[in-house]
Image (cartoon, helix red, strand yellow):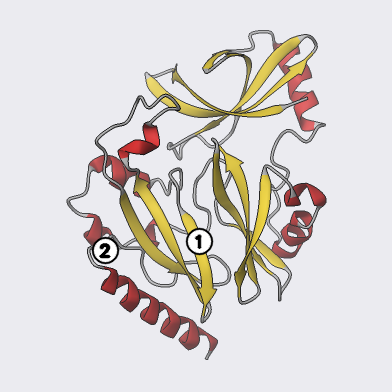
Amino acid sequence: MEKKVKNYVEFTLEGDITLKCELSYIFRFEDHQYVILYPIGNPEYKDPFLMRGFLDGDVATVEVIEDDEEFSRVAEYVSNTDILDETEDVTDEEELYQLLMADKYSERPYETKELDEGMAVVSEVIGGWWKNRFLLNRHTKQAWEFMDVRQILRTITQDDIDWETLEGLPIEAVTRAQNLSFHFPSFIRKYKNGVAEVKWQINPDGRYYEDEDGFGMTNDEEITIYGFIDQQGKAVGKFRFIKDKTELVAMRKAAEQLVIKRKN
């Protein structure tokens, strides 16, 4: 039986590339434990890693499966079970909507919340946090993957960001925006007049790193950019770093006008 956990591991690939991965699933097969790791924050690495893995409390240890026959047997087991995300290869909006109507998407680690105007969002627990994964249109019976299991935005592109407003921000935060990383707590708000506000955190408050015993807190300050999406999850206008909430009001008004213009 596979079990979702919320640990992260780092390892070095050839070429001294350090890759951070979320240890998404751990399962037992043929008297051994294995893990599935999803890369985080590096768009060049999208495919999951299948490795042997051991979890001792909060410490995760992983190792490469050296035996080719063993790897083939485990990979076949994974492909024949429901361990991996079955939505990954679904590109048809109607088909994805019907898939998300299955019972499994109505119970933890999934939940569906209505966003008004016939819209809804399916969220999934990833790394211990609820993350907005799929956007549903109840009227058209269509669905879109807003964010993939690697926590990378799928309907938003780099062209949807007003980069001038990000000038002067810490390079780490800007890089997360460039990578379209939705890793930190971020949300789709409710729809109004055809658009929904998206709060996209590209750097968390230092308390995000605090553990259950109160250790690990940093002096980081929250950095958030805002934007609006239509009923297909696509950006309406540009995502911006704003200094005053009045800017957000103006952004909404402009987004609503753009949606009306598109309809006409």
Badge 1 element: strand
Question: Horizontally, is 8 left or right of 106 in the view?
Answer: left
> x and y percent of residue 101 in the render?
78, 58
Amino acid at the residue labelled 2: Ile
Amino acid at the residue labelled 1: Ile
Mark 1 crowdedness (10 Å alpha carbons): few <14, some 14-19, many ≥20: many
Q: Does residue 88 appear anywhere in the picture? A: no
Among the 4 quarters of the image, the one containing residue 97: bottom right
> x and y percent of residue 196 in the render?
49, 70
Mark 2 crowdedness (10 Å alpha carbons): few <14, some 14-19, many ≥20: some
Label 1 to label 2: alpha-carbon separation: 17 Å
| Residue bearing the label numbered 2 | 242
Residue 89, above or below 229: above
Question: Horizontally, is 121 left or right of 58 in the view?
Answer: right
Badge 2 element: loop
Residue 87, above or below 101: above
Q: Residue at x 39, y 37 (%)?
A: 208
| Residue bearing the label numbered 1 | 188
Q: Residue at x 31, y 78 (%)?
A: 250
> x and y percent of residue 92 in the render?
71, 60
